[in-house]
Image (cartoon, rainbow, N blue to C red):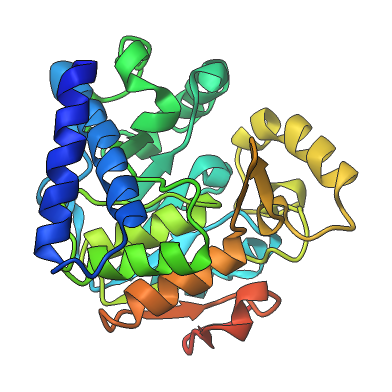
Amino acid sequence: MLSKVSKKIKILLLIIKVKLKTNFNISFKLAKFYSRWEVISDSIDDSIEFHNCNKATFKNLCKFKKSNTLFILGSGPSINLVNDQNWEKIAKADSIGFNKFMAHNFVPTFYHSEAEMSYLDTTIEVFNIREKDFKNIPIIFNAWHWDIINNGIKDLDFLNKENLYFSNPRRYTGLNENELSDMLYKIYNNILYRKETFLFHHSSSLILMITFAVMMKYKEIVLIGFDLYDNNYFYLEKNLHLNDCVNVFYKKSYDTYTANKTKQHLTTQVEKVGDISENNTIDTFKIVKKSVLDPLEIKIYSASKKSLLNEFIDPYENFFV
């Protein structure tokens, strides 16, 4: 791992590099934020390599890609409105499910888990339930949430190591909307240095999944199950496509839903991290669309009629539930 002195030197060199590359058209604050997160992410990359783990990169994952369209599968109640015919359409393209989507019988192309060590028992239980279905698809763990630096992968022996990958997203905590928009535009449009592994996690997993689609060079993104108008989840309702993972997820999710059933989804609220107010999912989504997707000419659509995101994106023409 990097020593404190070497980290400070690296931060200084990165700031100088950023300032030179941009002809001084970027503020010292943005350069400092960028450099700080590069140092932190480099430390996590070092740990991934130390534990001999696979990184979630385009190079490593492109062998699973078969389409230019990625369906991002959320856990909102509209998932239960997708019929068999439409699931067949989804299966012909690529898809990524994450977190509690395992409660659905559909097996996506990729699966991403935000599981923390505190959720280890739950993680083991759901993976044991879906072991046969998920054995040969890439399972991606967020190295931040898993805290791979301290925990490594010793507790993940129940997974197929050949298809186990670790993502290492940047966060950029503490930037306001304009600063964040400026930062992302410069990164994704080659004004700031961007690694092939670059992922961005802010506000919710939706933002991380969208930047995963960008990293994997998809031209079209379709959002399903990102309703956001309440805190309900598809596995709290009866549906033929659900499996035994429902029993694992149900209790905690039901309590959260019951306590907040009259409110919009929790991620749409402004989150306080210490003295810093973080942007909510909708505000961050607008930033990512404006500063990343639109300049790169990546199309994004909604397949959920009631989604709060429909104000900013077009409906998916093949189905809209």
Residue 81: in sight, yes or no?
yes
Residue 235 placed where, x, y %? 69, 47
Residue 18 placed where, x, y %? 16, 55
Which residue sits at x=60%, y=40%?
A: 243
Q: Nearer the viewer, residue 283 or 7?
A: 7
Q: Vertical placement of 132 versus 280: above or below?
A: above
Q: Vertical placement of 100 versus 64: above or below?
A: above
Which residue sits at x=20%, y=26%?
A: 7
Q: Quadrant of residue 254?
A: top right
Residue 69 placed where, x, y %? 30, 73
Residue 165: in sight, yes or no?
no
Quadrant, the C terminus: bottom right
Q: Nearer the viewer, residue 79 or 99?
A: 99
Q: Quadrant of residue 295?
A: bottom left
Q: Nearer the viewer, residue 239 or 66?
A: 66
Please indicate whether residue 314 sits to the left or right of residue 277 in the image.
left
Which residue sits at x=51%, y=74%?
A: 286
Quadrant, the N terminus: top left
Residue 93 placed where, x, y %? 31, 69
Q: Nearer the viewer, residue 289 or 64?
A: 289
Which residue sits at x=24%, y=18%?
A: 4
